[in-house]
Image (spheres, helix red, strand yellow):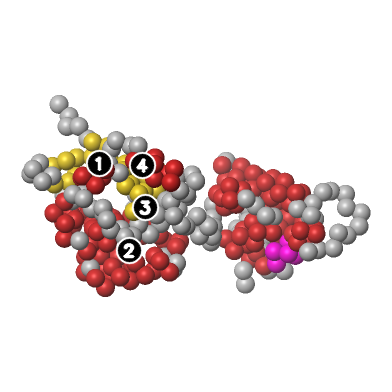
Amino acid sequence: MNAATAKDPVHPHGERHGSASSRRKALGDFLRTARARVTPAQLGLPPGQRRRTPGLRREELAQFCDISTTWYTWIEQGRDVSVSAAVLARLADALSLSRAERHYLFELAESVDPQHGLDAAGALPPVLADCVHSITAPSYILDQSWNILACNQPFLRLFNGWPDGQANPNLLRYIFLDPAARALIVDWDQRASRVVAEFRADSGARADEPAIHALIDELLAASAVFATCWTGHAVVDREGGLREFHHRTGEILSYQQITFRLATRPDCKLVMLLESKPSN
């Protein structure tokens, strides 16, 4: 039975000091403030009588979210209890949290929002594409499936014209299915293995989403290298670092890769390749 829905929930563990305790207190304070903004009528509940505080009572919110009042009270009190992502999602919906508030709730609870990326998907806002084109270094924007949503001219020059003119270009398909990638990327085998580990870390919580699931299945069937790397289950952060490419003149071009998460599109990343100058 899920602890968050049990009638007799497990007693909370002893309190810990430090940042975890501070997060739990902030989570409780935030939920209490959000609860005070919501009226029973907004959830289709009767108004009740003798309401001494504004908004919902704890028992009303707990009942609406299908958890025990005791358990919810512990959450607001900042006790050391574990709350599932499903319960957090129900609380966010019941409290009509904005996108920023919902993100804050899941950050405080150190949990992954089941809705992460679903409400942000779609065409890239023109202002973000304009931002990429204003950057002088090779730059591009990736979505959660590693589709390239925008790239600038320096990137096109570095990648010998790819993906100019292509519909729905995808960085993983390029690396594993396009022979040009092997000729362009220095130490392709090592980089390919690293890329798969980065993508696994990136997509772990969303691997069952249709678009990502379909992409993984396609690459497993089409690339023996991808299949070998994927079944290895290596996981690493997309930390950036040195990236080297073979130039058509025969020289090797070196760049430092820097990745930024976009605040207005949390499902996307802006990647910049800054030219790495040789040390004297």
Counting other residues with Cα less than 10 Å from the Cα at mark 4, is it few (<14), some (14-19), or many (20 or more)?
Answer: many
Circle 2/circle 1 CB separation < 8 Å? no
Q: CA distance from mark 1 to mark 4?
A: 10 Å
- Magenta segment: 62-69
What is the three-letter code of the residue carrying label 3?
A: Leu
* Quadrant location, the N terminus: bottom right
Q: CA distance from mark 3 to mark 2?
A: 27 Å
Q: Is residue 28 left or right of residue 204?
A: right
Label 2 secondary element: loop
Residue under the point 79% across and 54% down: 39
Task: Decide which of tag 2 and tag 1 comes sooner along the chain.
Answer: 1
The x, y position of residue 250, in whole percent, is 7, 44
Q: Residue furthest top?
A: 280
Residue on which the image places disc 1 = 154
Front residue of this view, candidates 150 and 58 = 150
* 266 lies above or below 279: below
Front residue of this view, candidates 93 and 169 = 169
Residue on which the image places disc 4 = 132
Q: Is residue 238 magenta?
A: no
What is the three-letter code of the residue carrying label 1?
A: Pro
* 6 lies above or below 76: below
What is the three-letter code of the residue carrying label 4?
A: Val
Residue under the point 44% across and 55% down: 123
Tell me the tag on residue 149. 3
Q: CA distance from mark 4 to mark 2?
A: 33 Å
Residue under the point 57% across and 60% down: 85
Q: Is residue 116 visible?
A: no
The x, y position of residue 265, in whole percent, is 47, 49
